[in-house]
Image (cartoon, coloured by chain):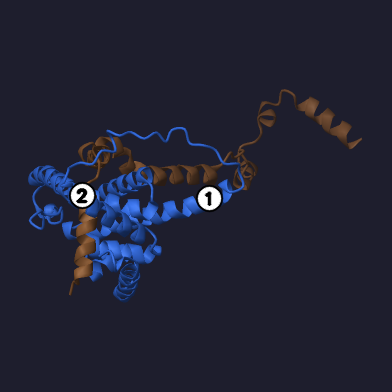
Amino acid sequence: MTTDFEKRTQEVLEESTARLDGRTRSRLTQARHAALAQLENPARNWWRAYVPAGAAAAVAVLAVVIWSGPTQPVASPVEDIEILADAEAPDFAEDGEDLEFYEWAAGEVES
Amino acid sequence: MTAFVTLAGVYNTPPFRVERSRDQDSMTTSRALDQFLSSVERRAFKIAQLGLRNDDDALDAVQDAMMKLVQSYASRPVDEWRPLFYRILANGIRDMQRRRTVRGRIMAWLPARVDEDDDFDPIAEAPSHDAGPAKRLELDEAIGVLETAVADLPPRQQQAFLLRNFEGLDVNETASAMGCSAGSVKTHYFRALESLRAKLGEVF
């Protein structure tokens, strides 16, 4: 239940509000229009909708870069085994052209 | 005010109608927000002015609250706008009061300076409407003592008093705006009334 004192204070505050000067009322109207312009010009904030997707994409790219990294070609042991297990003889053995040179070289190494 | 619809329910309609409904709802929401903000802006300014004792700061606080309400809560049901708006405003006022306290502590160490921009503009400061001289004098006095007494209240009592008595929020809406329980609102409001009665009893 509202008392007379409460009614009186309410009336006085209402009167004070009604007396606001023109400059203040004008600035309040401008503030309201500026706030509502956010609804009328959503294009100004269109990028906000893409922020989460953009952030996720950036994280994914970063993860891929870190995961793959600047790798150097490393010879796989499997490749070595394939070479050793190759049934074909080396080229010099088949051609027989420089066989004497390789025999001399082997002798030099042993001596 | 309650006749305005919210954006809820739009998404159950076929795609073509969704576009039309969104446009229509956007216009409806814009109009509803315009009406709502114009209905509260002057009282909101008065509340901020009494809390901050500075017109420019009060205008900044009200504008900030308007921007945040439209930005973040435009799609919420219309009934929720008022407590949400006053909650944002109350937070803004409190933040400004805290910043001012910190600034005051820092400035206390610096030499005082005269503010040359504080010129008095008689046209801008002119009241918006006139009344009889006697009535006007009486109201001037009443406004002066009441506003001084309200501005001197502790922040939470001031908030409870202005939201309940001046803005006309009920206890639950005030509690929502102040971020406290209904019981706390009643206590703050009761203490504010007692304090104001003690100061204004003879004048009122």
Q: Is B203 located above or below residue B21 in the figure? A: below
Q: Nearer the viewer, residue A7 or B52?
A: A7
Residue matched to label 2: B136
Question: Label 2: few (<14), some or many (≥20) within 10 Å?
Answer: few
Sequence order check: which comes first, mark 1 or mark 2? 1
Q: Are marks 1 and 2 on the same chain?
A: yes
Find the residue positioned furthest to the front: B134
Task: Report the chain shown in blue.
Answer: B
Q: Residue at x 31, y 76 (%)?
A: B183
Residue B158's quadrant in the figure? bottom left
Relative placement, left or right, of A3 versus B98 is left
* Amino acid, disc 1: Gly
Q: Position of residue B83 (x, y in %)?
A: 25, 60
Q: Position of residue B37 (x, y in %)?
A: 20, 48
Q: Which mark is residue B17?
A: none
What color does chain A have in the rendering? brown
Q: Nearer the viewer, residue A48 or B136?
A: B136
* Amino acid, disc 2: Arg
